[in-house]
Image (cartoon, rainbow, N blue to C red):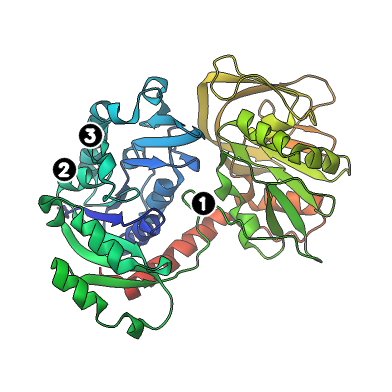
């Protein structure tokens, strides 16, 4: 008979303190020890999403954490997903499906509806697994948001979790962050804090002096770990590497980086392999020096298109397409490259004329297509997924099917698809690289990620507290 263990919860003093990666590390470490473990995050805000086997949508981070735990990804692990699609509006995904009614409610009015769904999911996970590792969001010290909290101390109190508070020491001010965050908690919440964690440490640990003892004297809570700054090749929760620039002598591919770009982790195989230099492009420039251009998915294709037109980057893309080099549009990028985006339900930014580089017409439907797909292509299976409101069709017979009829099209040097995750497959990676005259060294990226998870667990076993 298995023993149910007390939930572990990771909270952060700030956003990007490293909560997600620590939960991922703990899940793989415990799974490798034979523990039946699962991740949980009540509410995530990110445009990087994943699709479960039953066609439901969850945050990419919780999907990765489930893989780390060697568990089947489930909406129970992330019952609420917020996908920003405007400055002050997010699409709300409840238990894997879009809920338009809740999306329209003011933030503080949502808890009464959502909280029971959060508790139901958490209870179900606790019944199915021996150990649940919970991730908070932002900071529990945001006292202005406490009344509507469904993800931080409300969850900790509901399951009486052992809570560990993480600070990003690379930013500086860690001990003030830890002390201040602890001081903002109610007494019953402070009692749940079992340890402080310093994360992303670089340098000589001796430089910390007696600061950890000082902090324990103030709070009664020990600092249980000092985790190093760790470079990995795992998907990011909601950020993207922006520092790369065009390099002379390299194979350079421009990734058009517009507002509301989504599922950017699907280009990790291009970012981390040595054969290519992927460069985010977000302003008008001469693209002719690049070997290919990619337009990624978008949570709001209309607003992403408007951004391109406002800064005239659309002119750069059109000029590049006339060189005959490869242009690839994925999902929202497909819609932007097309002739029309019809938005009858005002799901995004209204009706738009696209760039017209491929003669496709798209209508944004009220129902969202969400599925995992294994697609036969070039006598092999591509492991892919779909997340889109758009339904597209060709306007002229010179537009041909690409990969799978009805969800991918090609016209001249313009290639488009609604399929995400293409570059995770060695066969597609090699097809793309052959098109641009680069080395065809594709690997199974999912296997690579699994190896990275084991390396992460090894790091945590060395420096962590479990």
Q: Residue at the far top: name it.
A: 344
Closest to the camera, between mark 3 and mark 2, is: 2
Query: In terms of secondary structure, where does tag 2 sit?
Result: helix
Residue topped by disc 2: 158
Residue at left 75%, top 46%?
A: 293
> Above or below — where is 320 with respect to 460?
above
Locate residue 150: give its quadrant. top left
Upstream in sequence: badge 2 or badge 1: 2
Q: Position of residue 466 (x, y in %)?
A: 25, 68
Circles 2 and 1: CB distance less than 8 Å?
no
Upstream in sequence: badge 3 or badge 2: 3
Mark 2 Cα within 10 Å, few/some/many (few <14, many 20+)?
A: few
> Above or below — where is 226 with respect to 272?
below
Residue 245 lies left or right of residue 219; in this view the side is: right
Residue 401 lies left or right of residue 157; in this view the side is: right
Residue at left 24%, top 41%?
A: 146
Upstream in sequence: badge 1 or badge 3: 3
Number of dots carrying numbers: 3
Identify which residue, 61 or 145, lies in the foreground: 145
Residue at left 68%, top 47%?
A: 282
Mark 3 Cα within 10 Å, few/some/many (few <14, many 20+)?
A: few
> Above or below — where is 247 with respect to 6?
below
Locate residue 81: give its quadrant. top left
Q: Position of residue 203 (x, y in %)?
A: 43, 80
Residue 242 lies left or right of residue 31; in this view the side is: right
Residue topped by disc 1: 239
The numbered disc on residue 120 is 3
């Amino acid at each position: 008979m298995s023993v149910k263990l007390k939930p572990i919860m990771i909270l952060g003093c700030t956003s990007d303190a490293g909560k997600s990666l620590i939960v991922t590390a703990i899940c793989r470490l415990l799974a490798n020890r034979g523990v039946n473990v699962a991740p949980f995050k009540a509410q995530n805000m990110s445009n990087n999403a994943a699709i479960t086997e039953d066609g439901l949508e969850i945050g990419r981070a919780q999907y990765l954490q489930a893989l780390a735990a060697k568990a089947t990804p489930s909406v129970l692990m992330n019952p609420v997903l917020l996908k920003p699609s405007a400055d002050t509006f997010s699409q709300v995904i409840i238990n894997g499906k879009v809920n338009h009614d809740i999306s329209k409610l003011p933030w503080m009015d949502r808890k009464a509806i959502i909280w029971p769904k959060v508790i139901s999911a958490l209870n179900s996970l606790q019944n199915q697994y021996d150990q649940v590792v919970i991730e908070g969001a932002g900071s529990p010290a945001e006292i202005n948001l406490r009344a509507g909290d469904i993800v931080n101390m409300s969850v900790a109190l509901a399951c009486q979790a052992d809570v560990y508070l993480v600070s990003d020491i690379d930013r500086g001010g860690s001990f003030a962050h830890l002390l201040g965050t602890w001081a903002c908690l109610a007494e019953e919440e402070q009692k749940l804090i079992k340890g402080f964690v310093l994360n992303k440490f670089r340098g000589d640990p001796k430089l910390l002096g007696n600061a950890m003892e000082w902090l324990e004297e103030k709070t009664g809570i020990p600092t249980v770990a000092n985790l190093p700054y760790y470079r990995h090749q795992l998907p990011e929760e909601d950020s993207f590497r922006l520092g790369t620039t065009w390099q002379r002598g390299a194979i350079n591919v421009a990734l058009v980086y517009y507002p509301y770009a989504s599922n950017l982790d699907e280009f990790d195989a291009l970012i981390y392999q040595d054969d290519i230099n992927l460069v985010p492009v977000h302003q008008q420039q001469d693209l002719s020096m690049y070997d290919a251009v990619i337009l990624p998915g978008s949570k709001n294709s209309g607003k992403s298109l408007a951004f391109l037109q406002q800064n005239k980057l659309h002119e750069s893309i059109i000029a590049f397409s006339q060189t005959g080099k490869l242009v690839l549009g994925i999902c929202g990028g497909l819609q932007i490259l097309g002739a029309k985006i019809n938005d009858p339900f005002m799901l995004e930014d209204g009706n738009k004329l696209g760039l017209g580089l491929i003669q496709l017409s798209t209508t944004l439907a009220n129902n969202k297509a969400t599925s995992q797909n294994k697609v036969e292509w070039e006598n092999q299976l591509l492991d892919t997924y779909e997340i889109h409101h758009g339904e597209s069709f060709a306007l002229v017979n010179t537009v041909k099917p690409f990969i799978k009829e009805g969800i991918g099209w090609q016209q001249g040097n313009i290639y488009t698809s609604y399929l995400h995750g293409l570059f995770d497959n060695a066969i597609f990676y090699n097809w793309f690289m052959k098109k641009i005259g680069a080395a065809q060294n594709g690997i199974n990226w999912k296997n690579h990620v699994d190896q990275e998870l084991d390396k992460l667990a090894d790091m945590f076993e060395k420096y962590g507290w479990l």
